[in-house]
Amino acid sequence: MQQDLSQSQKVEQRLSLTPQLKRSLEILQVPSLELEALVARELSSNPLIEVVGAGDEGIICPLDPQKQPKSGLSEGDFDDSPDTSSNGGEIIPRGEDYSEYMEDSGADSREANSRRDYIFNSVEQRESAIENILRQAYLDAPDKSTANACAFLVSLMDERGFVPEDALDRTEKAGFSKSEASRALELLRGMAPSGIGAFDMRDSLMLQLEHMGRVDSVAYRILRDHYQLLLKRRISEIASLMRIGTSEVEEAINSLSELKTSPLRDFESQQSDYVCVDLVARRGEDGLWRAQLTNERIPELRINTDYRNMLALGKLGKEARAYVGEKTREGRFLINAIAHRQRTLKNIGDQICMRQSSFFSGGGFGALKPLTMQTVAEALDLHPTTVSRAVSEKYMQTPFGVVPLKRFFVSSVSSADGTDDVSNAAVKSLIEEIIGGESAANPLSDSEIADILKKSHNMSVARRTVAKYRDSLGIPPKSMRRRY
């Protein structure tokens, strides 16, 4: 069969993710602290962007989301008349060489540089947990090869900070000697956060007690000799085998509950426990709750009019003119993207306040109503993924403390008679309340909790769902809650 090659054309529609759109989505999604760092990088690379200050102390003004900056460049950006509306006075060029315009041009430039330095110096550089551990390795290792072997072990750790049981063998297969692998593992197990480098949960808990100097404690002996009985909470059997009272066993188990079950993950959360509040929920005079932007870390930016005036005077060379034009476009895009981010965040915050008013009015998390991102997206004429990006790692100050925006989006649970839906947050709140009122000697099973929810609260919740919600609340199963 003869095959022919041919060319053809067809028209079709495709969604193209341009570099500008990718940048805009990045600005929409990043938390305020990361956006501050992003702005600082732009300030360092784009001399046409400056921070609008307020007063003589270099205070940074918040960006007003209601302002509608112009998109792109207009003919006015390259008109023939100098613009002196912002800085006051005439702009006097000092030479044909474009580099001369980058020099200090008096008090205004010094003030602009001062504000720019404020942004640079205020960006907090955070060290990740892995970076912290690697720094310890190269500081404390007796030699470079041991430090390298330790770095290889770090690469094997899971999200909790545990290494696989065959970690030493894998380190040797990577080219390190047996002694180097052993020294590296010992070094890793001695680092902070305490408990990393363990092979499993039991090993990690014992390691934490060793770091605390509690090798001879009852808790350590229980982990070492009776771990399986501990998992089943057989307190009487443990007490009998150790020939001590049940109260001593209870006290030891309570002390174990204070240890870290995921040392690396907990350390990461401690490293990033500082969050920046993006929105504040306030009740208006009409009694309605609304969201107000804080803009704690987001400065107000503008294009430096000095450079626009340089173009207007027509004394820049072709390359300098092209450079200033490009940087002006980049600056305007950044300003527009930040303004769009703030408007979107404000609108989503208002929707949350309106749809979850029972929460803000005193009902708390148990009063949260079913709410999906699709619902908010339709109300604001946005795509659900845009809402998801906008609320990612954003926080709101509420009467019940600082709350992640994502927590206001809750799925629904059907009522037993099918007449109404309730949020899973309300179900979790009831589960906490039910377990809080149970008998310590005879705690409730997940099935019994599901029955109570159905009979007393008209909620049809499966036993598996109760178990899932209980786990998410950090409440142990029935066997671990029993007290003798």
Image (cartoon, rainbow, N blue to C red):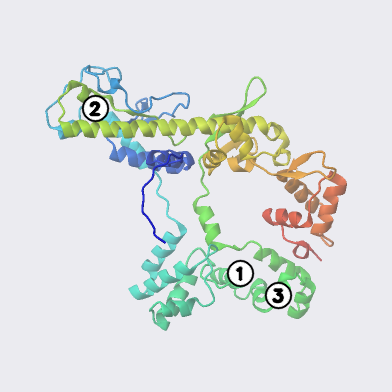
**Local crowd at mark 2 within 10 Å, few (<14), some, or many (≥20)?**
many
- Mark 3 residue element: helix
| Res 48 visible | no
- In percent of width and height, residue 174 lies at 40, 77
Element marked by disc 2: helix
Q: Which mark is drawn over residue 126?
A: none
First in sequence, mark 3 or 1: give its number.
1
Give the percent coordinates (x, y) of residue 245: 77, 73
Tell me: residue 334, above or below residue 215: above
Rounded to the nearest angstrom, the CA distance separating label 3 from label 1 is: 12 Å
In front here: 418 or 442?
Answer: 418
- Residue found at x 22% / y 33%: 322
The residue at which mark 1 appears reads as: 201
In the rendered image, the vertical position of residue 10 relative to residue 473, given as above or below: above
Query: Label 3: few (<14), some or many (≥20) within 10 Å?
Result: few
- Seen at 75% across and 70% down, the residue is 232
Task: Tell me which corner region of the image, top left, top right, bottom left or bottom right, holds residue 282.
Answer: top right
The reply to whether dot 2 and dot 3 touch (C-beta < 8 Å) is no
Where 192 sits versus 128, above or below? below
**Residue identifier under label 2:** 307
Estimate the spatial distance between the alpha carbons at disc 1 and disc 2, rounded to whole Å. Answer: 61 Å
Label 1 SS = helix
Query: Hey, what amino acid is under mark 2?
Result: Tyr
Extreme residue toward the front, this view: 1
Residue carrying label 3:
228
- Pointer 1 local density, CA inside 10 Å: few below 14, some 14–19, many at least 20: some
Q: Quadrant of the C terminus?
A: bottom right
**The N terminus is located in which quarter?**
bottom left
Q: Position of residue 241 (x, y in %)?
A: 75, 80
Q: Amino acid at mark 3?
A: Gln
Dot 1 and dot 2 residues touching (CB under 8 Å):
no
